[in-house]
Every structure is written in structure tokens, then in C-alpha cells.
Amino acid sequence: MAGHNKWSQIKRKKGALDQKRGKIISKHIRAIQAAVRSGGSGDPATNLALKNALSAAKSDNVPIDNVERAIERALGGGEGGNFEPAVYEGYGPAGVAVLVEALTDNKNRTAGEVRHVFSKHGGNLSGSTAWQFDSKGMIVVERVGEELEEAAIELGADDIEVDDGSTVIYTDPTELYQVVEGLQARGIEAEVVQLTKLPQTLSPLSGTEAEKVIGFLESLEDLDDVQSVYTTADLENAPESVG
């Protein structure tokens, strides 16, 4: 099936954030609290946004105690702020399209911070880029084999990649948990389960361009309010980090 180096981009992002453990936990806690408040429930069985947030947090090994406290605070209306989603679209170094998703309690502040990073790195926070990305469910299983791929296809997978001993399964967002539960019924456990956005096409970059783009992306990801950053940049052969 089609392989467009999608997983390599997500691995790079995860690697960069894993170096900042406290920040990545904080971002997940914010997402969980926002999901509880927007969905009006602390039960993932009836709150799909919370289910998505919990799956993402589990994939990044957020401690269960942190998760439980976040849900309790959100249900109790205590500390944590009322965060709203915000999306920013623009172009970064080398003209790569970028889509930024944030959760913020002050949209003016967040917009200013995001705009500053774009400007500092030679980008431009203008123009529509969301159309260049497709929303997908993503499942990563740390094993490979025809049996696994056939099971994923049978369960409704849209696309499959094999990367460095892992099988990456992409689904329609509405069928993510149906596929996950189908795999579990066959004794196949996933390492990562989350919603993501995939570029429809990738922009090839030179080595110098890739370094500039990675520095730009990491600056965006380092902002407290930013949850996810998606790009059309082809970073498969780029250095893992420049920071």
C-alpha cells in the first residue's frame, strides 16, 4: 500500500517532545481537561473527544495519576483554565505548508506567539493550508507480517506502512477504535492510537532547508498552547533534531 514517509514525520515530532517530558505531559493534561469540559463528561465511553485525548496520552506514557487528577479537576471546575481550540494555517521555511492546532485560554496571546515564530523563521502566517491535509486515525503496532496487514485490511484500514519493525495502520477517523478493538480481539495490541493529519503530498527539501524547517517546527511545538503541528515537508532523511 502507499507509503509516503508519514510515520517518519510523527516519529520526529515525538522524539523532539520526548526530550521535554514535563512539557508533553502538560500538553496532554490540557487536552484531557478541555475534552472533559467540552464533552461534559469524564467517561470516555460517552465522550469521544476524551477517548481520543486519553488514547494520545497513553501512547506517550502519561502517568495514570496525572490523567485521573486532570479529569477530576475538570469535572470539579477547579484550576486548569477553560481552553478553546484554535487553528493556524501558514507557510514555513522553503514554502512548506503548516497547520498548527492549539488549546488556549487567550487566543490573542497564542496568535501572537505563533505569528512570532513564523516571522522569526522566515515563514508567513497567512493563506489556507488545511485543505492539504487529510484527517486520519493512526495505529502503530510494534511488529510486522502479512497476517497483521491482512487483519488490518479486513478490519477496514485505509493504508498501511511498514517502518523499522513497526506496522503503521491508517484509518478513517470514525473507524479508528473499531479497527483497534478488532485487532485486540485477535491478540494484537497497539503501541500508539491517535488521531492525526497527513499531508496529501510531501515537499522535498535540501539538507539545509530541512534543518531550517525542523528548527521552525520545534519552536512551534515548544509553545505551551500548541498541541500539534503538521507539515508537508519531507523530513524522512533529515536530522532528528537541531535543538
Image (cartoon, rainbow, N blue to C red):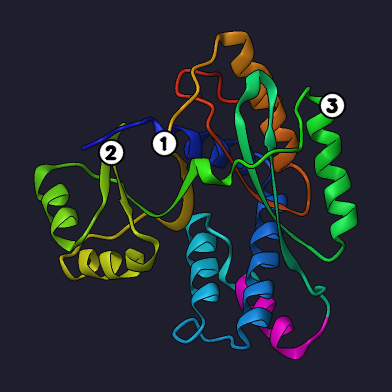
Residue 68 on the magenta span: yes
Name the front one of labels 3 and 2.
Answer: 3
Identify the residue at horizontal 68%, vertical 81% (top origin): 37
Marks 1/2: CA–CA distance: 9 Å
Q: Main secondary structure of the magenta part?
A: helix
Residue 155 on the magenta span: no
Image quadrant where one finds the C terminus: top right
Which of pointers 3 and 2 lies earlier in the amino acid sequence? 3
Residue 120 appears at what percent x and percent y? 84, 26
Residue carrying label 1: 6
Residue carrying label 2: 161
The kind of residue on which mark 1 rests is Lys
The kind of residue on which mark 2 rests is Glu
Above or below residue 88? Residue 185 is below
Residue carrying label 3: 120
Q: Is residue 242 visible?
A: no
**Helix, strand or loop at mark 2:** strand
